[in-house]
Amino acid sequence: MQSSPVPAPPPVSIPALVHQVNSPADIAPADVHSGLLHLLGLPAGPTRDVMLGSVLTGLLLRGPRPAEVEAAIRAASALDSGSWEVLAPPPNVRLIGYTGSGKKTYKTINLSSAAALVAAAGGAHIAKLGSRSASSKTGSRDFIDVVGARCETIPAPTMVDIAGECGFGFFSIEHQVPEFDRRYGGRFQAVHALSLGFPALLSPVACHGFVYGLSHPAVGVSARLLYRFGLGDVTVVNSSPVPGSQVDELIPGGTIRVCHLTAGQEDPEFGCAVARAAGAVAPVVDLGSLAQRADPRANVAAVVRLLAGRAPAVAQRTVALNAAVLMVTARAVPNLQAGLDTAHAVLGDGAALDTVRRFVSLTGGDPRTVDALLRLPDEQRAALTVPAPRRPPQNAPASGALAVPPSDRETTAC
């Protein structure tokens, strides 16, 4: 007896947006919104993933055009935003949100987590948003787990109290967007349209200011998008430590891009001040101490050593620069130079390591985990993902000042 043939699966409905991204014409925001929701609602599988990737990448490569990207972010938010509850910050505290797009092309240790902890030890209050790694050895959520914190069982209101008490709180963004994450999580390795701002909008606690790291040069587009979504004091940073690379933190020595908006008005002087601060910490010409380690636990141990003041000067200077921006945003210091001085003092006396231990204890974890990581030997300087430059890139002054590529309209220039 012959078996009945297996029926072919029904054809997948392809929204017009898949074709529209290939045209130079503007796409109506309503078409972006409905088209992306259509794609996100398709059955799981390679067809949906390929079309979703094509659309999100295409929207970035088309400009990016702010109206189109805003519509895409609103569509991604629509799956979960009805259940969001935004908490009040701790009383009498200026809380600063801090996260990044991830997906950097030069893989580093967890620089943003280190900078947040140094800033907290320097008097700032930081709400660090993060997720598990999609393209690196350890994302910020992985970092928190490895140091021994038990954030999974901490309700968001309790984490807000912890941020008020020790200056550092961690908030997992996957918890904010479970439906979106079910369709998106783990499927993208490179930046795309949503990278321009979506992660910064997932804080469960209201923040007075926000610092966002972007692995793409369009810092101005990103900052203006975040302002349109209600972030009144926002700074977006990006750097290219090696020609052609994109990192969502500031690494002195290459091209640095900064856009700071307050109440929708750009402050170009802040970008100049960051450039001067980058020059003050000296250019980074050897990236080995910044590059991620081969093993996740070794990757986190490298950050713990850094916080204890046991890392090469290059790594300490880089983290100090990022921490200084956070401290200025938090108004914990009057200017970037004071922030640099405070950050180096914190790294020198072990205060940042004490902040880690205290945070772990407040979450119910064992701070001895931090000490165990500190005792691990650094198994290697790092396996570089790209060659470390021995001289500054062609368009980057040796002083570490802000470099302005003539074709990049989104670079804040002095």
Image (cartoon, rainbow, N blue to C red):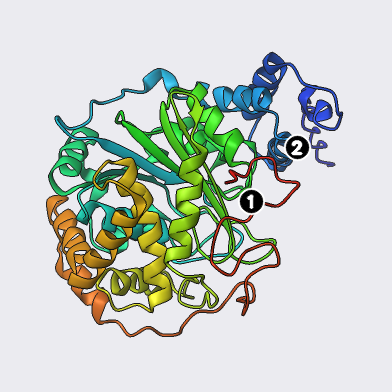
Residue 131's place in the image compared with 106, above or below, is: above
Which one is earlier in the sequence, the residue at label 2 or at label 1?
Answer: 2
> According to the image, label 1 marks what residue?
190
Local secondary structure at mark 2:
helix
User: x%, y% of residue 49?
Assistant: 68, 40
Q: Residues within 10 Å of mark 2 (few under 14, many from 20)?
A: some
State left or right for residue 301 relative to residue 225.
Answer: left
**How far apart are the two marked residues, 2 and 1, measured between alpha carbons?**
12 Å
State left or right for residue 166 relative to residue 219.
Answer: left
> According to the image, label 2 marks what residue?
58
Can you see residue 79? no
Q: Residue 312's quadrant in the figure?
A: bottom left
Residue 402's place in the image compared with 382, above or below, is: above
Q: Residue at x 31, y 24 (%)?
A: 86
Callout 2, which amino acid?
Answer: Gly
User: x%, y% of residue 120?
Assistant: 23, 52
Q: Residues within 10 Å of mark 1 (few under 14, many from 20)?
A: some
Which corner quadrant holds the N terminus? top right
Q: Nearer the viewer, residue 278 or 319?
A: 278
Callout 1, which amino acid?
Answer: Ala
User: x%, y% of residue 308?
Assistant: 24, 72
Local secondary structure at mark 1:
loop
